[in-house]
Amino acid sequence: MTLQPNSSDVKRYTFTREILNDPVTGNSRKQLCLYKLIDDNGITAAQFYYYAKEQFIEIEGKKLTVSVNEKIWKKPQYLLIDPSNNQLGEYTFIDSEMRLFWQDVPTEPNGTVTLDKAVYNFRRIPSGIPSGECFKFMLYGIYGDTYAEYTLKVDQLTWWQRFNTNYYLHSGTIETNTSNVMIVVSAFYLIEKVFETLHEADS
C-alpha cells in the first residue's frame, strides 16, 4: 500500500449504526442493523441494511443486494448484485469467517471486497483505546493508494436500556481519499461480520 495523501485530499464522512427490532415480527432477538453514510452537508449518501434474511445497499436510488450462495463442501460465495441481476463485486473472508482480534492477522487481512475488478483488503486495526467501546477498521486497495479508515464508537448500554429501547445507535467517522461512495459503504458488510463474530464469541 502506498503512502496516504496529504490531509487536504482527505474526505470525511460520519456514519451511524442503528440496531432495530425485526421489522416484521418486532422480535428484538432478530435484529436489523442499519448503517447510514452522511456527508459534510448532513445528507445521507448511502444506506446499508444488514438483516438475517437480506443484506443490501441503497445508493443513488438503486438497491444493491448482497447475495450469499451456500455450496456443499465449498466456501460460500458473497456476491454484490445490481438491480439488473449483474454481479458488481464480491466479498471473501479469511478461513470463511472474520478474525476476532486484529492481532491474529498481522500479515493478512480479515477479508477482501472486489469492485469493478479492483480488490481491496479489509482488516480490523488497533483502536488505541484500551476498552471494548471503540473499533477501527481499514479498507485499502491492493494496488494504488485508495483507502478508507473507519472509527466506530460503541456506547455501553445497561441491561435496562438494551431491553427497553426501540433501537440504539452507534456513531462513527470515516477518513478516505476516494470520492467513490460505493467503495466506502461496501465495508459496512465486513464490519457487520466482525460484530457477528464478536457476538458469537460472547454467547
Image (cartoon, grey):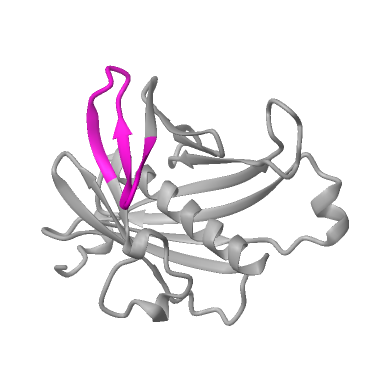
Q: Residue 93's image quarter? A: bottom left
> Is 106 rendered above or below residue 154?
below
Q: Is residue 47 left or right of residue 167?
A: left
Looking at the picture, tell me which residue is in the foreground, 120 or 104. Answer: 104
Q: Is residue 90 left or right of residue 185?
A: left
Residue 72, given in percent of the width and then of the height, sits at 34, 46
Residue positioned 51% across, 47% down in the render: 15
Q: Is residue 168 magenta?
A: no
Residue 182, given in percent of the width and then of the height, sits at 31, 38
Looking at the picture, tell me which residue is in the foreground, 9 or 69. Answer: 69
Look at the magenta stretch and give its main secondary structure. strand
Residue 187, given in percent of the width and then of the height, sits at 38, 50
State which quarter of the image contains the C terminus. bottom right
Residue positioned 43% across, 47% down in the render: 189
Q: Is residue 53 left or right of residue 175?
A: right
Residue positioned 83% across, 53% down in the render: 161
Q: Is residue 87 magenta?
A: yes
State the extent of the magenta-drawn residues as a range.
67-90
